[in-house]
Amino acid sequence: MCERFTVPGRAVVECEFMPQRSWWNYSRKFNVAPPQYVPAVRQHAGESEGVLLRWGLIPSWTLGQPTSGHVSVDLDHMERADAFRSAWLNSQRCILPVSGFFVWRLTRKRYRQPFFVSLMDRSVFGLAAIWDRWVGEDDDVIESCCLIRVAANDLMADIAQADRRMPAILRRADYDRWLRGTPGEAKTALRPYDARRMQAHAVSPRINSARHDDAALIRPVTA
């Protein structure tokens, strides 16, 4: 699955998603890991807005000071599990703008080889996610999110092998349906992306450390 991803620059993201209001301020990143804050597009009061959310969903009913959150959730599990059901039924959906993401293949020598996955015809695209708002006893507020996983397509299944899931990549035509539609309508936007329009290559294990954040992380290496 997707454990890390890359975030394109703000100008490129705003050109792709055109949020009506922008509350975010961030720069391009090549190694986003939880619980970092990430740009997200969501609906508020009938308008789309660009905000920063913490990656790792914290349910609104969580007691005490949260220390971690849910990074991702399977589509069928999201509708049943207490941690996600409220956000899903209340249409607290968002889109995380990315330029690519990382997955790992376990080799015969038990080495986890990282791969960078991107789209052939799009330099920025959106991953489907849900978000929630936690308020602590001292009025501390954390707005957080988690990615949604769907069944892996052929490319992702070949890379991740045992993990038969992939992040839900949204088609441009589905942006509005995902953000504005009913839960039933939004669910139809969640399906495996066409593997023929995706590409992947092996990258350096430097991606395994969140300390590194530079363009060299996405350069091809010999697997």
Image (spheres, rainbow, N blue to C red):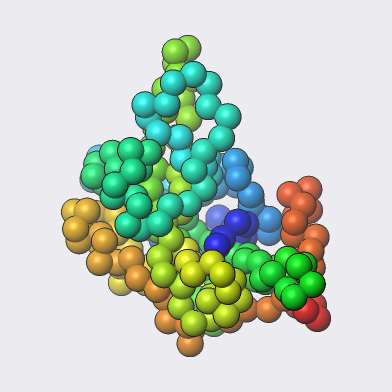
The residue under the point 69% across, 69% down is 106
Residue 176: image x %, image y %? 28, 61
Residue 39: image x %, image y %? 51, 49
**Looking at the picture, does residue 219 appear above or below residue 16?**
below
Residue most extreme to the top = 138
26 vs 82, nearest the viewer: 82
Task: State the quadrant of the N terminus.
Answer: bottom right
119 vs 63, nearest the viewer: 63
Task: State the quadrant of the C terminus.
Answer: bottom right
Residue 120 appears in the picture as rendered: yes
**Looking at the picture, does residue 138 appear above or below residue 127?**
above
Residue 93: image x %, image y %? 33, 49
The residue under the point 79% across, 64% down is 205
Residue 94 appears in the picture as rendered: no
Q: Quadrant of residue 107?
A: bottom right
Left/right placement of residue 18 relative to residue 13 reads: left
Count of marks, rendered view: 0
Left/right placement of residue 6 relative to residue 130 reads: right
The residue under the point 29% across, 43% down is 85
Left/right placement of residue 119 relative to residue 77 reads: right
Q: Quadrant of residue 11?
A: bottom right
Residue 7: image x %, image y %? 59, 58
Q: Quadrant of residue 74?
A: bottom left
37 vs 78, nearest the viewer: 78
93 vs 123, nearest the viewer: 93
The residue under the point 33% across, 38% down is 82
